[in-house]
Amino acid sequence: MPSQSKYIAESIDRPAAEVYAYASDPANLPQWASGLGTAIENVGGQWFVETPQGRIALAFPKPNEFGVLDHDVTLPSGETIHNPIRVTADGSRSEIVFTLRRLPQMSDEEFERDAGLVAADLATLKRVLENT
């Protein structure tokens, strides 16, 4: 059965290259993606975040010219979740779009809660970048 997806977008009044450069640096995650975690650590080239559920591992793509910020989150259980995210140009502005996929065991309430967390993180990214 195909998974359900929700596309969560935020328009940012900054060039796409600037948004991509900031958002693609894992060290910046605590400043804008508190839904993921509040502290990030690089250990031997691997990124980790402490969450209420335990320590999770993050894997990011190599820098690219296409605005691809897809990343894999490996939960303490060992399950890996792929998170598609893109930054695209919109004239002198940009749009960032996160594709939230509903996991098989998720209730409607959990899916909506996660969507709210992602939307809040993208709104924070907008505030951080537009106030610099």
Image (cartoon, rainbow, N blue to C red):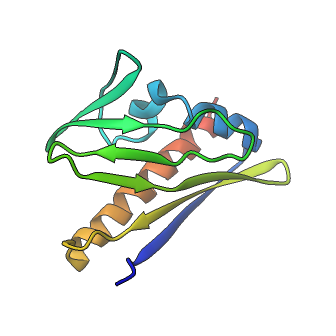
Q: Position of residue 89 (x, y in %)?
A: 78, 52
Which residue sits at x=62%, y=47%?
Answer: 68
- Which residue is farthest right? 91
Residue at point 54%, 28% (across, down):
25
As drawn, is 82 to the left or to the right of 43? right
Q: Position of residue 46 (x, y in %)?
A: 37, 25
Observer-nearest residue: 79 or 119? Answer: 79
Q: Is residue 94 left or right of residue 55?
A: right
| Residue furthest to the bottom | 1
Determine whether 3 is above or below 46 in the image.
below
Quick one: 89 or 1, which is closer to the camera? Answer: 1
Q: Is residue 107 at least partly visible in the picture?
A: yes
Q: Is residue 109 above or below residue 54?
A: below
Reply above or below: 6 against 87: below
**In the image, 97: left or right of 106?**
right
Q: Quadrant of the C terminus?
A: top right
At horizontal 54% and vertical 53% (from top left) the residue drawn is 85
Residue extending farthest top: 44
- Mark yes or no: residue 35 visible: no
Assign the N terminus to one quadrant of the image: bottom left
